[in-house]
Amino acid sequence: QVQLVESGGGLVQPGDSLRLSCAASGRTFSNYVMGWFRQAPGKEREFVAGISWSIRITRYADAVKGRFTISRDVAKNTVYLQMNSLNPEDTAIYYCAADLRTNSAILTTVSAYDYWGQGTQVTVSS
């Protein structure tokens, strides 16, 4: 059984930084895409960033490009999302997700991902 556990969320001020972590377990994640999504109150869940597990290709939503960085530690089976220059529009629950199709492209739709974490709240407010 695949498990994804996010951590690192919290309350920060505009301009601050946070780093989210997603610890994966249950299988070897080589060749699988890992993604970060977010969902703000009253809005649909949206793609934030994705990374190909084995060949380090990344993809970002336009709203976070240049501010957020996705990375992974293969040895720890962990994916990170470094978030800089946070603003109130970044306030949301952030979810980690796994697309278990081998050698998949990094897709941005919710339906492309097979497993999800429980989410971690990020609140940006002064």
Image (cartoon, helix red, strand yellow):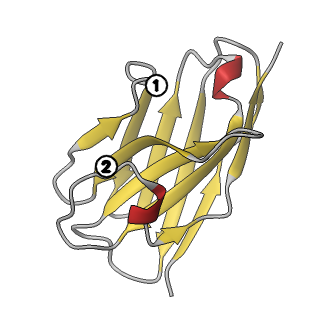
Dot 1 alpha-carbon crowd within 10 angstroms: few under 14, some 14 to 19, many 20 or more: some
- Say what amino acid the circle numbered 2 marks: Ile
Q: Residue at x 38, y 63 (%)?
A: 112
Q: Between 42 and 113, which is closer to the camera in this rendering?
A: 42
Relative to 56, say whether 126 is above or below: above
Whole-percent x and y of residue 47?
Answer: 47, 43
Nearer the N terminus, badge 1 or badge 2? 2
Whole-percent x and y of residue 63?
Answer: 47, 23
Q: Is there any visible trace of residue 77 in the rendered image?
A: no
| Residues under numbered marks 1 and 2 in contact, where contact means CB atoms less than 8 Å apart | no
Q: Residue at x 59, y 43 (%)?
A: 38
* Residue where numbered disc 2 is placed: 51
Q: CA distance from mark 1 to mark 2?
A: 14 Å
Farthest residue toward the bottom? 1
Residue 64 badge:
1
Relative to 86, say whether 100 is above or below: below
Q: Quadrant of the C terminus?
A: top right
Whole-percent x and y of residue 1?
Answer: 51, 88
Judge left or right: residue 91 versus residue 52: right
Q: Secondary structure at mark 1?
A: loop
Counting the numbered discs, the total is 2
Whole-percent x and y of residue 33?
Answer: 31, 60
Q: Mark 1, mark 2: which one is toward the viewer?
A: 1
Residue 28 lies in what quarter of the image? bottom left
Q: Between 3 and 38, which is closer to the camera in this rendering?
A: 38
Farthest residue toward the right? 126
- Say what amino acid the circle numbered 1 marks: Val
Q: Secondary structure at mark 2?
A: strand
Judge left or right: residue 14 versus residue 104: right
Q: Is there any visible trace of residue 51 in the rendered image?
A: yes
